[in-house]
Image (cartoon, rainbow, N blue to C red):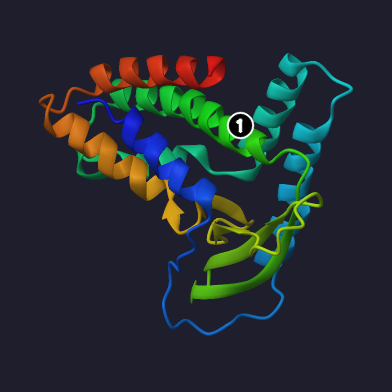
Amino acid sequence: MRFQPILRRAFLVMAVGVAASFVAGAPAFAASPAEDYVQNNINKGLDILNNKQISTDQRRSQFEGFLLGLTDMKRIADFTLGQYRRTASPADLAAFEGAFQNYATAVYQSYFSKYAGQSMKVTGSQARTPDDFIVVTQLIDPNDHSGQQPLEVDFRVRTDTGKPVVVDFSVAGIWLALNERDQFTSFLGQNNGNIPMLVSHLAELAKQFRNG
């Protein structure tokens, strides 16, 4: 099974801005450390992508470093393996975590690059638990005078490790890590749980995203 077309369709839905809410009925949350963390750091990432005075390779390297400092890639990778995480050998798990990091940075850069020139504004947050927040933002395009609602991008921020980290994000209601978990576990289910096969497939997809 090839899950790249599904991911591309998911991001196509994101691009047209069909907004949806991940947490229904949760109360609005006042300005919080999670909100400050997202506001300060995501704009740093957009600044990197907007910097035309450096080469493409430099932007890619700087954005990857920024992304790895912002997110808990190991935690996200382990989550996307679903039930296969429990039976994976240490060697297979380490190989998958490395391949996932390479794949995820390629995906994030590919799609956030589409919004270069825009800025991000935090509009609020919702507390799932005392250390688990959904931070709601909007991408503001200074050249858009259509009057349409700005694109909503939400970030799930965990603070249970002593500092805020992003563990997932959604555009227009589609959560990337949740979508990846569904696709990865489906792939493994159809390939006898063969994690090295998934590792090879992720390497191929990362190459396509970087060259796309």
Query: Relative to 148, is 9 on the left or the right?
Result: left
- Looking at this view, name the residue that lies furthest to the front: 146
Which residue sits at x=58%, y=30%? 110
Residue name at image x 74 percent, y 61 percent: 121
The residue sitting at 41% across, 29% down in the picture is 97
Q: Is residue 51 visible?
A: yes
Residue 156, image x and y in percent? 52, 59
Place of residue 205 in the rendered image (x, y in percent of width and height, measured from the top left) = 41, 20
When asked about the image quadrant of residue 154, the answer is bottom right
Q: Write down the quadrant of residue 211 in the picture.
A: top right
Q: Position of residue 132 (x, y in %)?
A: 51, 66
Specify the quadrant that holds the N terminus.
top left
- In this picture, is 173 found above or below 44? below
Q: Amino acid at mark 1?
A: Gln
Q: Is residue 71 left or right of residue 118?
A: left
Pick out the residue farthest to the right.
Answer: 53
Name the residue located 53 percent from the left edge and 61 percent from the top edge.
160
In the rendered image, residue 59, in percent from the top left (x then y), is placed at 75, 24
Residue 129 in view of the camera:
no
Please count the marks in the image. 1
Q: Residues within 10 Å of mark 1 (few under 14, many from 20)?
A: some
Residue that label 1 marks: 109
User: What secondary structure is marked by label 1?
Assistant: helix
Decide: is 177 above or below 21: above
